Image: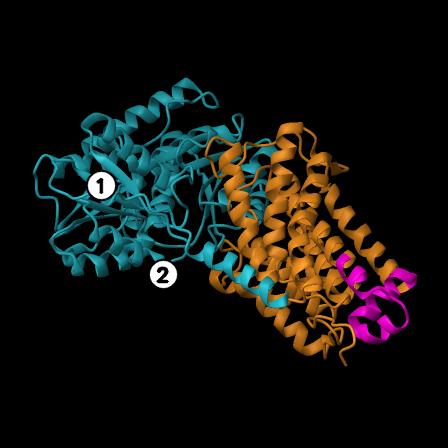
Amino acid sequence: MLSSIMSIINTTLMYSTPLIFGAMSGVVSENAGVVNVGIEGIMTFGAFVGAAVGFYTQNPWLGLLSGSLAGVILVVLHAVASVNFKADQTISGMALNFIGPGLSLFLCRLLFKNKTTTTRIANKLPKIFGLVDVTVLLALLITILLWFVLYRTKWGLRIRSVGEHPAAADTLGINVTKVRCTSVIVSGFLAGAGGAAMTLGVVSQFTPTAISGQGFIALAAVIFGKWKPQGAYGACLLFALAQALAVTFGGGRIDIPSEFLSMLPYVLTIVVLILFVGRSMAPSANGKPYKKGKR
Amino acid sequence: MKKLANIFLVGIIIMNLSGCSWSDPESVANDGIFRIAMVPDMGGVNDQSFNQSALEGLYELRDETGAQISYVESKQFSDFALNLDKLADGPSDLIIGVGNVLSDAIEEVSARNLDKNFVIVDYSFGDKTANNVTGIIFKAQDAAFLVGYIAGMTTKSNKVGFVGGIKNVIIDQFQYGFEAGVLHASTERKIPIEVMIQYAESFADAGKGKAIASRMFSADCDIVFHAAGGVGYGVIESAKEYGTFAIGVDRDQSYLAPDNVLTSAVKNVGTAVKLVAKELMAGKKIGGKDYEFGLSEHCVGIPENHKNMSDEVYNKAMELSKKVESGQITVPYDEKSFEAYKSSLK
């Protein structure tokens, strides 16, 4: 019994961490009014760069930082296209989902003798008390920090104002383009970190399937959590908990076909969403490019 | 400006969608050169597994016989038939689809191109095999039987695990072969050995693989065998963290964790593809039937590298391998044959 509970907690924390980074990435960008559907692609690129740098430098922290910066490099495309050029945010975000994995595999083949997986890193990110990955703690700290910035600082107010009503923010002298660009870049940084957290913490190498849907689940968690950091954090934990339950009770330990158990995370998410969360309100200018002087 | 950016981004997407590598030469046939073209599944030719093995086998054939080899990778499932069609229009003598996900595409395209020979790896059309189609199937259960035996002989906790990807006939071969092998060891050692079995319902989610394997290891398993593609990276990772053993699949996976991979159930697609292509080159008719490969053709088996087990266990496994080859032991490959195998032991 005790070992089951420990295993559920462990799996929940392990599984939720990359999701939380991804969800925070979505929260920061969407609160500024820029939809970022490219989280999956950015995470994949961050996962590759993190694992590659982690391998060459033997330093997982450098890997984590590089993975995050790789996310920034990729997301700049999205920022420039959707904020500066006012392109459709969904399209430019979707482009990242193609560019991220494509670029990762291309560079991987280039750097690792034509292989599509990187060589295992020698040093992984450390574990706290030998139990949970340090990224679990990092994810929590980032969530708290993001909550603080969004709701307790001037910057946060600016971010939220350009997401709610960019024209009003503009008349008050806030540089909408700058605030949005900055938010998208922070979003890329966090998504990149989430990818690297996968390849430097959960496993210890990049594979083409290292990021398999986490970015999209993170996006769902943003909506589930009503675009709030604490809400999205809870959504990720809930999803991971359901996954952990499916794993712990799978394999014939209870008499339910494993296909049904595998549906549990998704079904549970929908049920909780309908029963307890209620109406989810997006920032009103979310997804809309801002044009000066347009009403 | 906005329009420009849109066009640019759409361009990138289109480039991605249509970016298949086209390496079939447009030269005319009848110059005496034997041409083989291959369509790998979504993993691509550098997947360090199945597809790569097939291509390496073909390259060996090229070096031996001068046959010309080309391949076309697919970016999505709907590309399979398209790419096969392209190849069928070219001068290729033999077109190979690697992986059972290509079976529908092969069936469709082979019916349109009766003058071409097609091979499908890991799939059998059974009685409905067309005259220009050849199936290559593996007795993967034989390799799984050997690793199961090794696991059963090596386990100290008398508890081992199996992590499957998604249940299908191919993964069944691994699961029941493995269970039979463990059972064989347990009869020999005269102790009961428990096998925990769990499916990840995925071939990609390494995190889930790690969670399942960790669950098994914390429940006292000391060896876990995976037949789950990308999920397996998580299984091996977990073995490394727990200081226990994982057993690899498809190829020798010991490079992933040299001290924690006990052995691997190897499936040598390249050797099989080469054998079949050679038959055709020698002028034999290969269409309309299946080729089944096993231990004796060296198409399945275990790697020689056995530093994590005792020599005694390895040698015994080799003896067992001979018994399977000679037909003294028939390894089960599905639930029904496994039940029959179990009752034959009693």
**Residue B142 visible somewhere in the drawing:** yes
Determine whether, in the image, residue B289 is placed left or right of residue A119: left
Mark sitting on residue B36: 1
- Tell me if residue A292 comes above or below residue B217 in the rendering: below
The chain letter of the orange chain reads A
Residue A194 on the magenta segment: no
Q: What residue appears at the point 85 percent right and 62 percent down from the top-left corner? A: A150
**Residue A9 visible somewhere in the drawing:** no
Q: How many numbered callouts?
A: 2
- Measured as percent of width and height from the top left, residue A199 is found at 62, 41
Mark 1 lies on a secondary structure that is strand
**Pointer 2 residue:** B78
- For the magenta stretch, what is the residue range? A152-181
Counting residues from the start of the chain, the first of labels 1 and 2 encountered is 1
The amino acid sitting under disc 2 is Ser
The amino acid sitting under disc 1 is Ile
Q: Nearer the viewer, residue B194 or A116?
A: A116
- Tell me if residue A110 comes above or below residue A288 in the rendering: above
- Which colour is chain B painted? cyan
Label 1 crowd bin: few (<14), some (14–19), many (20+), radius 10 Å: many
